[in-house]
Image (cartoon, grey):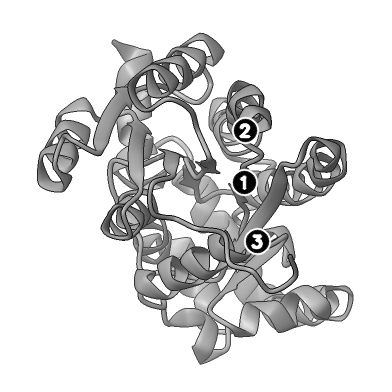
């Protein structure tokens, strides 16, 4: 019925990238609303601590790399076995690196695409059967980067634009089965990834030309509030902060404006790009966020 809110209490929610940041904050919010939550991620110690904090009666954790379909299938199966099904799934896991597409290591480009785009697709594939059974809601986490394609974040913007398109296609494909599909578009939030990006010397140079409202990360709670409302409405699109909705509607106009703003001083832009390329052989300067380092550790181990 139009205007009717989708209940959260009693529903089972699976969230990837749930060890920290947006993923865990969302799990806490929905658990507080009476949901059962399955936390999926790469940091088992932190995931276990999160579940202890929430209480094990309505929370469980499962270690899974979103580039590993078998691990995702196992996490989904274990969630269904534990809680009886899945009503809401949030494909949230993501990583990022700062660098130029021509200069950053190929392995970093491919890793971002593997986690942020193909990892979302694998998550969606893993949960879609359970969601068809429940007539549930699937939410893919995109980004403002899906709309505005800035330099130094090429793989990230490409992946998030892909998530935007993927979500549109899935929305049509799953509608006949009673499954609603949403995508969330977040601006710069106060997360590990954003803080890490802002500390990079190349990004610091570019940020001098960016409007103040883009430079100041918004509190994560703005995203959590928006997602909570979006889940209740089974929304096709969710924006946070609110001005991102305007960016979504005007993206055809804003991308050229963004390019002129960032590239207004060709010398300064070239200097930033050269700084990024000089840092390309120092992955400790490029890895943004604990989750990215955890993924590196799993693959090196």
Residue 242 image position (x, y, % from top left): 58, 83
Q: Residue furthest front?
A: 1
Q: Is residue 264 visible?
A: no
Residue 48 lies, with reference to residue 101, above or below; the image says: above
Above or below, comparing residue 91 to residue 114 in the picture: below
Q: Position of residue 189 (x, y in %)?
A: 43, 69
The residue drawn where x is 42% and y is 25% is 84
Q: Which residue is mark 2?
A: 131
User: Which of the two labelled residues, at mark 3 and mark 2, occupies the earlier sequence position?
Assistant: 2
Labelled pair 1, 3 in contact (Cβ < 8 Å): no
Left or right: 52 in relation to 159: left
Q: CA distance from mark 3 to mark 2?
A: 28 Å
Q: Between tags 3 and 2, which lies in front?
A: 2
Residue nearest the observer in this picture, 45 or 88: 88
Q: Residues within 10 Å of mark 1 (few under 14, many from 20)?
A: many
Give the position of the C terminus as an image quadrant.
top left
Q: Relative to the observer, which residue lies in front, 138 or 264?
A: 138
Element marked by disc 2: helix
Label placed on residue 145: 3
Query: What's the mark number on residue 137?
Result: 1
Q: Residue at x 26, y 30 (%)?
A: 60
Q: Is residue 99 in view from this perspective?
A: yes
Locate residue 254, reporting x and y percent: 80, 79
Question: Could you give the CA–CA distance between mark 2 and mark 1, rounded to whole angstroms?
Answer: 7 Å
Secondary element type, mark 3: helix
> Could you tell me if the residues under marks 2 and 1 are in contact, i.e. CB atoms within 8 Å?
yes
Vertical comparison of 55 with 71: above or below: below
Residue 197 vs 100, above or below: the answer is below
Q: Which image quadrant for residue 113?
A: top right
Which numbered mark, 1 or 3, is in the foreground of this view? 1
């Amino acid at each position: 019925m139009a205007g009717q809110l989708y209940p959260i209490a009693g529903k089972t929610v699976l969230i990837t990238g749930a060890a920290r940041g947006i993923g865990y904050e969302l799990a806490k919010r929905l658990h507080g609303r009476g949901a059962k939550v399955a936390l999926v991620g790469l940091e088992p110690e932190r995931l276990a601590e999160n579940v202890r904090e929430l209480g094990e009666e309505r929370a469980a954790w499962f270690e899974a790399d979103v580039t590993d379909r078998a691990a995702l299938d196992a996490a989904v199966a274990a969630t269904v076995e534990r809680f009886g099904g899945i009503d809401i799934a949030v494909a949230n896991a993501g990583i990022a690196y700062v660098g130029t597409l021509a200069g950053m290591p190929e392995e970093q480009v491919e890793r971002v695409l593997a986690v942020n785009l193909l990892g979302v697709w694998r998550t969606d594939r893993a949960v879609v059967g359970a969601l068809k059974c429940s007539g549930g809601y699937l939410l893919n986490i995109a980004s403002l980067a899906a709309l505005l394609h800035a330099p130094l974040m090429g793989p990230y913007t490409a992946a998030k634009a892909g998530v935007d398109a993927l979500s549109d296609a899935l929305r049509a494909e799953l509608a006949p089965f009673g499954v609603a599909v949403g995508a969330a578009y977040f601006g710069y939030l106060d997360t590990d990834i954003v803080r890490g990006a802002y500390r990079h010397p190349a990004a610091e140079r570019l940020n001098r030309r960016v409007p103040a409202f883009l430079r100041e990360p918004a509190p994560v709670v703005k995203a959590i509030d928006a997602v909570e409302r979006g889940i209740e409405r089974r929304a096709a699109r969710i924006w946070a902060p609110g001005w991102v909705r305007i960016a979504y509607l005007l993206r055809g106009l804003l991308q050229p404006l963004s390019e002129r703003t960032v590239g207004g001083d060709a010398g300064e832009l070239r200097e930033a790009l050269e700084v990024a390329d000089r840092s390309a052989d120092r992955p400790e300067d490029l890895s943004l966020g604990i989750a990215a380092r955890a993924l590196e550790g799993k693959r090196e181990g």
